[in-house]
Image (cartoon, rainbow, N blue to C red):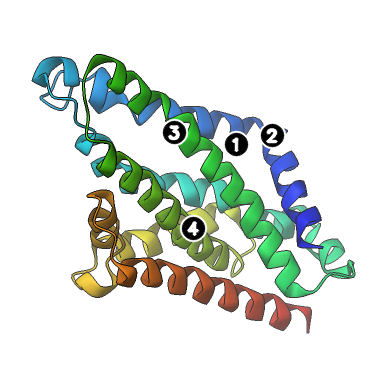
Amino acid sequence: MFASVAAKEVRHALNSQFAVILALIFVIALPVPVYWSNSATNVFVSGLADLTPFFGQLPLFLMVFIPALAMRAWAGERGAGTYELLMSYPLRPRDLVLGKFLGNFALCAFCLLATLAVPILLNRIGNPDHGPIIGGYAAALLLSAACLSAALFVGSLTRNHITAFILAFLVLAMLMFVNLPAVNFHARFTNIARGIVDTRDLAFYGLVTVGFLYLNVKRIEWGRW
């Protein structure tokens, strides 16, 4: 059942000019410090085949990109008056939530995969360390899942997609920069991106993702009554 909801989310995004433009901005702007800036982060300036600047700014991009992508998932349904129709379908709340999550996560994963041109080109002009690159992309997928689950939950609390974006952005900003390493999204991301695979970091992102999805299910169940 959730697969049909996920497919609907993907089709809606592909038919949305906003989602397509958002994805293009993400894919084009992310490599700027590596290839097109005038700073030392440019590999042609520094002479170093290093993607540290690329992965260093990735959490900040996701902090904006994911709330913008997810803001219409629930709030858009309410604003367009289709939420009640969606609730009338013979689908369990967990199928609806999981479908929304998987559909939007597929879009996040696609955008990340589209940036593989960056390390591929870097591999052509230098000899980068592949461990941190693999770790960086693995960390990006885990971080995306956690951020997306949080953004979807926050978006389910409001009817306005702009409000959903602002609230999700603020929540993610707090989680990125909170002065508690144990719950700091950015710090956990940095650990994995360095190629240091710690099961505690993996468990953290898994628990955060499942936790926010659970809260989202409970919110939808409560909304039906």
Residue 26, disc: 3
**Residue located 78% across and 79% down the image:** 224
- N-terminal of the pair, mark 3 or mark 1, is 1
Residue kind at label 4, given as amino acid type: Ala
Can residue 178 be seen by looking at this rendering? yes
The quadrant holding residue 28 is top left
Q: Quadrant of the N terminus?
A: bottom right
Residue ID for mark 2: 14
User: Disc 3 on helix, strand or loop?
Assistant: helix
Residue kind at label 2, given as amino acid type: Leu
Residue ID for mark 4: 145
Viewer-side residue, 213 vs 52 = 52
Please provide percent x and percent y for residue 165.
Answer: 50, 54
The quadrant holding residue 177 is bottom left
Please provide percent x and percent y for residue 195.
Answer: 25, 51
**Residue located 50% across and 27% down the image:** 24
- N-terminal of the pair, mark 4 or mark 3, is 3
The image shows residue 187, relative to residue 136, as above or below, that is below
The alpha-carbon separation of the residues under discs 1 and 2 comes to: 7 Å
Residue kind at label 1, given as amino acid type: Ala
Residue 19, disc: 1
The alpha-carbon separation of the residues under discs 3 and 1 comes to: 11 Å
For the residues labelled 4 and 2, say whether their Cβ atoms are less than 8 Å apart.
no
Can residue 73 be seen by looking at this rendering? no
The alpha-carbon separation of the residues under discs 4 and 2 comes to: 20 Å
The quadrant holding residue 50 is top left
